[in-house]
Image (spheres, rainbow, N blue to C red):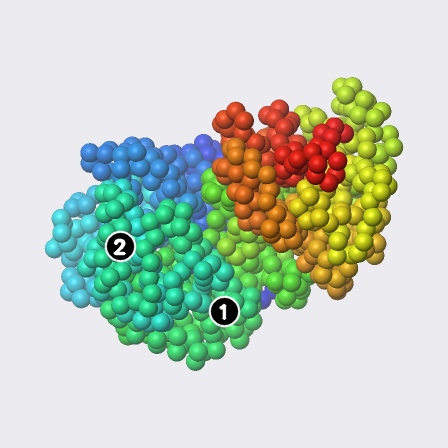
Amino acid sequence: MAEQHRPHTGPSPAASPAFIAALRSAVRGASDFGAAARALTTMDASNYRRVPLGVLAPRDADDIAAALTVCREYGVPVVPRGGGTSIAGQATGTGLVLDLTRHLRTVLDVDPAARTAVVQPGVILDDLRAAAAPHGLTFGPDPSTHSRCTLGGMIGNNSCGAHSVAWGTTADNVRDLSVVRYGGQALRLERGSGAGPAGVDALVAGHLALLRTGYPDLPRRISGYALDALLPEHPGGPDPVRAFCGSEGTLGVVTEATVRLVEAPRARALAVLGYADESAAAEAAPGLLPYGPLTVEGMAADLVREPAGLLPRGAAWLFVETGGATAAEARAHAERVLRAADAVDGAVVTDPAGQRALWRIREDAAGTATRMPDGSEAWPGWEDCAVPPARLGAYLRDFRALLTEHGLRGTPYGHFGDGCIHVRIDFDLTTDAGVARFRRFSEETADLVVAHGGSLSGEHGDGQARAELLPRMYGDELVALFGRFKDLWDPDGGLNPGMLARPDRLDANLRFSVLPKRPVDVEFGYPQDGGDFAGAVRRCVGVAKCRTQEASGAGVMCPSFRATGEEAHSTRGRARLLHEMLAGEVITDGWRSTEVRDALDLCLSCKGCRSDCPVGVDMATYKAEFLHHHYRGRLRPAAHHAMGRLPRWLRLARPFARPLNALARLRPLAALAKRLAGIAPERTIPVLATETYSRWLRRRQGRGTRILSSSRVVHLWADTFTEHLSPQVGRAAVRVLEEATGRTVLPPPVPGLCCGLTYVSTGQLDAARRVMRRTLDRLDLLPGQPLVVLEPSCAATLRTDLPELLPDDPRAAGLASAVRTFAQYLEEYAPDWTPPRLDRPAAGQTHCHQHAVLGDAAERRLRERLGLTGELSGGCCGLAGNFGFEKGHWEVSVACAEERLLPAVRAAEPGTELLADGFSCRTQLDQLAGRRARHLAEVIAEALPESAPGGGAPDPGR
């Protein structure tokens, strides 16, 4: 037990120069043996960590064969890797990692008549589904990671998903395979053909009785090698394709696959059924299967946190999806299910948006379940067993009792119609005692599953998490046969060693063992992680929702990954690098790491991961933390001085706004200024206001405004951008707020109060704290009074960064709770006000910080009351404060804007109102599209009658 917890005393082994040279001369694809590439692939979505020698991105099947030839010659193990979302550790390895997602991601053919498709192993499942959709077809298996998992990985794990009750597992949907063995030999596997390498037929023939009796009969039997598929009586003859599926990269590497497609229902409906408890839901599930549903998914109340209002009454629920040729047919099908179900409550949902919202609860469960309701951590250690569906209710009762016996907690959910349960458990995997309990629980639960006639794995494969326990399920004789089968395919043992045959111990190679045992000295409070930065970093469990190629709905995460396609620029990739930085084995220079710095350089600090990541990874905060330590006592980039201290420079520049604006229009001078300030040469320097917002408001109040009492005033935050760069937004907001509430907007008590945003985003945290304390000292805000903040990024800073940087100052939490957006304040303090009707379409962008921290429900309701129709774009504008202005970020900044914002604006019909509450979003539209967007306050103010308080329409000038 002590081995996996011993401290690391030196760097991990490196690949030999001779091997690297031989590999690079044999393949066309790029290989990388640097610290960053290795660090990025030490982990998948499991509890395990293994350090590879390097990473190769093969360009084609010939590259794979050549690489496997060289690796066998030099004795280097190989692990094929797709999306890296495996939950049992099988996508980690100690040798050469084959990254099959870089180049081998083409759907080669779709044959609608034959209902087949030919794919390369790195094809993302959603891409295959999109290619099949125009023909009314789809690929049946659909894991919750469908937006980033690959077909090669699905074949390796025999993945299933929610629709397996209708369409089966991946093995049921693969026709033939092209694979390459360790050493470079290519094989073609087809149903009804030979069983594979020489000796396999004889192995099967010599053990017919064992293979006929040794496997449990259930729909989700994923554990072990499917040698029973090679029996001569198998329908259609021996099926080497099915036997290969689920082999977890231990037999060969898939280079091409022909897969079966199924007809996609034209319409779908969802029957949501509420039950008194989890066991009642589980016992009801098998009775619904005769009605031919597409899915029968289940979850209990302890998994559902905030969106419970979407669900009918009950403490557990079944999601039963039905299909039909028409919406009416699908609905009628779902209503039959509802009538047949003995449920406490139920509803049929046909609205696609409503169905998506409900499915999002289920699909995010792999991440959501990693945190208990009290915030404590939970892990996948016993993730996806399956029992006969009729035994599921009894199994769940016994499983809950076993959890209680071990003093553990978990939140089961999953594919109740197939008897497959997922669960994350609050194992303590950081201490010897906790790891010992993890082992005892795993052994006892394996016995429980077998007692109910089940399979240790019902979806994600055995990997390292369960392969050691396979003798409890299959017996020693059949497991020994697994080893012989592996040896016939891979006699050198070079493919994914430690998995399935002769596996590593389930409590070895745990990824937590290398992290510091004591909290790291950091600046932010990390209140959700007990103040522990390592705890914050290990939030990332690797489900890789950040690796989606397209943002959906209002989602933001992760714009830099979508721009570059590089793992290092995903939230997961950055979290992995920070993990390895703390481990100190692969990345050995700690906070000074250039690998971590370079990966974080393209993080836009959009905070999208804070809300969109199922486990709430907050990379913007981690980036600020890293930059603070990385540059402590060192020379910072010029942009940190120029834009990180922007509030200070703008205050100094205020008296000279007119001449500075004139000088900025002179191209040689502007180019020199941008070069000195570290600003991208493609950017235009924003125009300075000749009269600040605060000066205007004081001048206006000097004309006779009288304040009668504190209950008749509005505190409007004069943020840096409104104050110096867009005061027209502040003037418009004053007019609207006073018209709507009858209250008087107060001038700032002291000029130049700042939230600290620009200091935080550049990692100047000591300066940020000084600025924040000055604000708290001078802001005259009575307890319980709200503070209206027009700029979303400043509101988010006050709401989150302020209390997390000053956790011991109660004033910080008080100010954070006082923050309101413009729309939130109007909704709360002027509920009876009738805004003007605009009745025109709107386009533009919801600020990423608004989406991630503040929420935009009030803004949506206000737009609806105004008659502004249409949805604003999600994603990120790409400017993101200082990010898009910094030299070297232009291409990524533009790519982010081109993803959703710019196309939406270009497609807007004439007369569409362009909305963007964030200064960055408005600036990006101005500089890239030549279009002027406005804050919602400006739009409303323009429509107010001339007699409204404030005296006429706001001056649009500076």
Q: As drawn, is 592 to the left or to the right of 863?
A: right
Q: Amino acid at mark 1?
A: Asp
Marks 1 and 2, how far apart at CA = 36 Å
- The answer to the question of whether label 1 and label 2 lie on touching residues, with beta carbons closer than 8 A, is no
At a point 64% along the width and 66% down the height, the residue shown is 530
Q: Secondary structure at mark 2?
A: helix
**Above or below, comparing residue 42 to residue 674 in the picture:** below
Q: Residues within 10 Å of mark 2 (few under 14, many from 20)?
A: many
Residue 366 appearing in the image: no
Q: Which residue is mark 2?
A: 334
Residue 830 appearing in the image: yes
Extreme-left residue of the structure:
233
At a point 16% along the width and 46% down the height, the residue shown is 192
List x then y, in percent, for residue 714. Answer: 74, 50
List x then y, in percent, for residue 70. Answer: 42, 41
Q: Secondary structure at mark 1?
A: loop
Label annotation for residue 426: 1
Label annotation for residue 711: none
Quadrant where the C terminus is found in the figure: top right
Q: Amino acid at mark 2?
A: Ala
- Whichever of labels 1 and 2 marks the residue nearer the N terminus, that label is 2
**Above or below, comparing residue 712 to residue 676 in the picture:** below
